Image (spheres, rainbow, N blue to C red):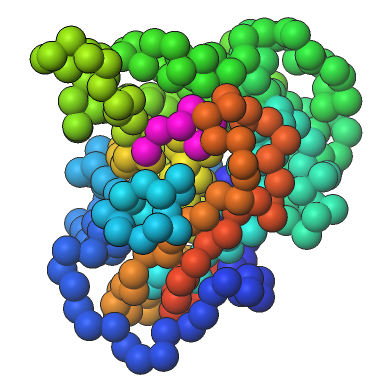
């Protein structure tokens, strides 16, 4: 899901670039910008569910974003030699508060859009409206009841969905808790998976998941933890946590900048919870498309040079606790975000 507009006032920790940045061809944001150029130049003109029309390509090259950089600062987490980085796109201002609020909403397992809307985050209002629910055959649902969408699948996969008010505690598979458990107990597991795609529930959802599948992988670039050659137990080597995201439907103008930031934040949260180094986010797209009413805005965005990705600071003292629930927005601090101004784009519902 994506924001309908990105015009919210910037948070206190962000600033506007004072001077045009120099061109840096190695900046990771160019992966995103170059993909948009490819779609605009070679994309197939296709009809779509919303009636807006798109230019689309299928299965473009993956985008890969680093989630940390080397650091010698003693203010790094636990005096580590890295600085956490958040790949928050800079060629337009991304509505960070909405990204974070939605992610915490997913993690809570909530399926009503009303709490988000009450907090000023309107990104799900269209799909939870009376008109839209009636249109997709869910007229029996209360306004805001989106059905068994992302959060429900993450926390209660396989449970029988009733409505947004039902307590599902202990029902279904808590995939997110399983991800945390496996990262802590069996980090070499090849089945550390988080899936929002449940075919049995698709017709019950106001909108089937676009970003639908994530796999987590732990690498040990400094060597596998264990015993050194002299038989002495070595200092614990921390794993680097990587996330591979598959997104079946990718709205390049509004959705993808949002999704990059969201899964990067989720990976940072998990790395904190299991005391690992945030490694990377690899983003795989299926139908990568530009809505026709976004073309002009994206041409404007393509004229801009990226600035440095900001640093991320998690202000919690429970590193390694395994706790992923009940985090608060104020426990995240983004430092040095210097984006260009926001560009408004309409969300197709």
Residue 255 can be seen in this image: no
**Image height check: is 307 above or below 321?**
below
Tell me where residue 96 appears, x and y as whole percent. 57, 60
**Image height check: is 344 above or below 19?**
above
Tell me where residue 204 appears, x and y as whole percent. 69, 21
Tell me where residue 135 appears, x and y as whole percent. 73, 37
Tell me where residue 327 appears, x and y as whole percent. 68, 40
State the residue at coordinates (52%, 21%). Answer: 180
Q: Which of the two residues, 230 or 307, is positioned nearer the viewer here?
A: 230
- Picture quadrant of residue 310: bottom left
State the residue at coordinates (11%, 15%). Answer: 229
Is residue 50 magenta-colored? no
**Image height check: is 133 above or below 225?**
below
Q: Which of the two residues, 33 or 142, is positioned nearer the viewer here?
A: 33
State the residue at coordinates (54%, 35%). Answer: 319
| Magenta-colored span | 272-277
């Amino acid at each position: 899901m994506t924001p309908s507009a990105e015009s919210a006032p910037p948070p206190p920790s962000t600033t506007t670039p004072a001077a045009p940045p120099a061109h840096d061809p190695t900046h990771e944001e160019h992966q995103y910008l170059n993909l948009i150029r490819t779609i605009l130049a070679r994309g197939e003109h296709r009809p779509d569910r919303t009636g807006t029309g798109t230019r689309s390509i299928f299965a473009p090259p993956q985008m890969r974003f680093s989630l940390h950089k080397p650091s010698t600062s003693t203010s790094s987490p636990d005096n580590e030699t890295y600085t956490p980085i958040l790949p928050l796109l800079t060629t337009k201002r991304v509505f960070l508060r909405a990204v974070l609020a939605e992610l915490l909403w997913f993690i809570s397992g909530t399926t009503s859009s009303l709490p988000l809307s009450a907090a000023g985050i309107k990104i799900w209002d269209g799909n939870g409206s009376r008109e839209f629910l009636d249109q997709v055959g869910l007229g029996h649902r209360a306004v805001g009841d989106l059905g068994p969408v992302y959060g429900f699948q993450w926390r209660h996969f396989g449970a029988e969905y009733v409505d947004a008010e039902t307590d599902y505690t202990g029902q279904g598979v808590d995939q997110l808790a399983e991800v945390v458990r496996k990262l802590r107990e069996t980090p070499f597991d090849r089945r550390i998976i988080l899936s929002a795609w449940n075919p049995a529930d698709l017709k019950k959802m106001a909108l089937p998941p676009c970003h639908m599948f994530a796999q987590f992988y732990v690498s040990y670039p400094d060597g596998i933890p264990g015993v050194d050659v002299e038989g002495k137990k070595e200092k614990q080597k921390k794993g680097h946590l990587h996330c591979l995201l598959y997104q079946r439907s990718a709205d390049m103008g509004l959705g993808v900048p949002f999704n990059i930031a969201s899964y990067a934040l989720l990976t940072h949260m998990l790395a904190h919870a299991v005391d690992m180094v945030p490694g990377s986010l690899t983003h795989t797209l299926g139908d990568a498309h530009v809505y026709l009413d976004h073309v002009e805005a994206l041409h404007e965005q393509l004229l801009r040079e990226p600035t440095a990705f900001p640093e991320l600071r998690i202000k919690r003292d429970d590193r390694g606790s395994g706790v992923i629930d009940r985090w608060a927005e104020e426990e995240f601090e983004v430092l040095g975000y210097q984006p260009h101004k926001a560009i408004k784009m309409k969300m197709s519902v």
